[in-house]
Image (spheres, helix red, strand yellow):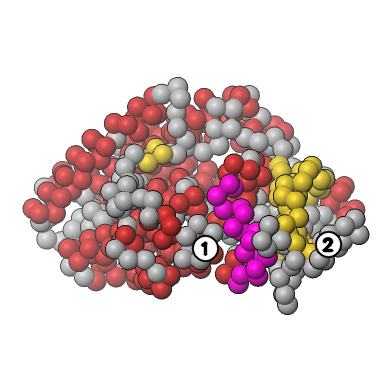
Amino acid sequence: MEWFTAPELWTARTVFQRGLAVLYGVAFLSAALQFRALIGARGMLPVPDFLRRTTPLRSPSLFHWHYSDRLFAAVAWTGTGLAAALAAGAADAVPLAAAMALWLLLWGLYLSIVNVGQTWYAFGWESLLLETGFLAVFLGNDDVAPPLLVLLLLRWLLFRVEFGAGLIKIRGDACWRRLTCLEHHHETQPMPGPLSWFFHRLPRPLHRVEAAANHVVQLGVPFLLFTPQPVASIAAGLMIVTQLWLVLSGNFAWLNWLTIVLAASVLDLTALTGTPGGNPRPDTPLWYAALVLALTALVLVRSRRPVLNLLSRHQSMNRSYDPFHLVNTYGAFGTVGRVRDEIVVEGTADRTPGPDTRWHEYGFKGKPGDPHRLPRQFAPYHLRLDWLMWFAALSPGYAREWFGPFVERLLAGDRDTLRLLGHNPFPDAPPVHVRARLYRYRFSTWRELRDTGAWWQRRLVREYLPPVRLGD
């Protein structure tokens, strides 16, 4: 079955599998460290409440059988440990069937988390991780040569990620067609990184080059993934370079890193490894070949709706078409904001707030707050509360379900919620009142940075939430 395998991609498969396992580990670790405040039994959007409103068919998850914070923690930490083992090569130390079972277990555990995560898990990269992880189940281990069909399915996924993002930009904001979006994007993106200020201050002609290069890589290069080597490897290399540029310029959880890992599966690295055929292995088992063929048929059938979405003038940005997140549609930044608004949450110990009340600001780990604080690098780790605060600043509608419970937990001094923050101004006792105000942020100019040491300038826009206390 020589046509069935691609031995020249033996090393590429290993790089892909180890990288995917690392990102799985980051995702499970993020869940383990943040879930109690977000979706725990006493969280802002409790899983038990959600389970009463849904069914196993609508949101498949082992938590339909039973939910407790202890069980959720066990699932998250088990996933973290299993991902670490796979990253260290555990799948190559066991028989093929056992390796597939390990990858399937990892996928099932994370699916169980995503499907009860509600708005905290409504990000495109959650579906991307699950779709990639499901394909990885069938990629095999050192007992078999890499199956060509699964590698092509990974390229089809990478194509949809890049081409979908390119189409939605061209169809969306006119600034992408004018090549001016990146004059704003580095400043207004959800969570800037430590180099975002410097990217924003690049000359305007370079911003146009950035935008034009983005269009080439996302709209033209993806078609080259299905050409013979070395052209396919060159195309994947261009995507990797573009994604590394995005890694340096912002924080997008594991979206960029997962795209890099997908592109790595395309690279023919035989010139570097000197082992074009890998080590001699037994023939591909018939049962394994049958499963790969069944997977290919399933993905082709399930690709109909994502393809129709790509062709539609009303293209959806990120969407799953089934509760198992098997074949999804992707896109990013169909519109780019021109201004940046941020919610600043403050508290006071005063019983009756007045004009002379002294308010103390809560600090977040990732999102802008203190103008003198340089944004930090967190990706691929995902700060879910910080991301949702960015959406809440765009419109209160994005925060209708969880912002009130968030403030209530600040007033109660909830330890799990406070662990999500970077700075708690009330370490000894919770505040009596909490309020939120909307500020407009912009990056400082070179002169402002030199004179004040502040990376941001901000001005008050309006009140977002008036002072409230427990019981209001």
Q: Is residue 226 visible?
A: yes
Whole-percent x, y for residue 98 in the image: 20, 66
Residue 304, compared with residue 197, is above or below; it is above
What amino acid is at disc 2? Answer: Thr
- CA distance for labels 1 and 2: 29 Å
**Residue plotted at (32% across, 47% down):** 58
At 58% from the left and 50% from the top, the residue drawn is: 388
For disc 2, the marked residue is 352
- Location of residue 202 by image quarter: top right
Amino acid identity at mark 1: Gly
Quadrant containing the C terminus in the rendered view: bottom right
Relative height, residue 139 to residue 414 (above, below): above
Q: Decide which of 346, 173 is in the foreground and name it.
A: 346
Magenta stretch: includes residue 407: yes
268, 130: nearer the viewer: 130
Q: Which residue is mark 1?
A: 43
Residue at the front extreme? 471
Q: In this rendering, does residue 380 appear at all?
A: no
Q: x%, y% of residue 84?
A: 38, 69
Labels 1 and 2: the sequence-earlier one: 1
151 falls in the magenta region: no
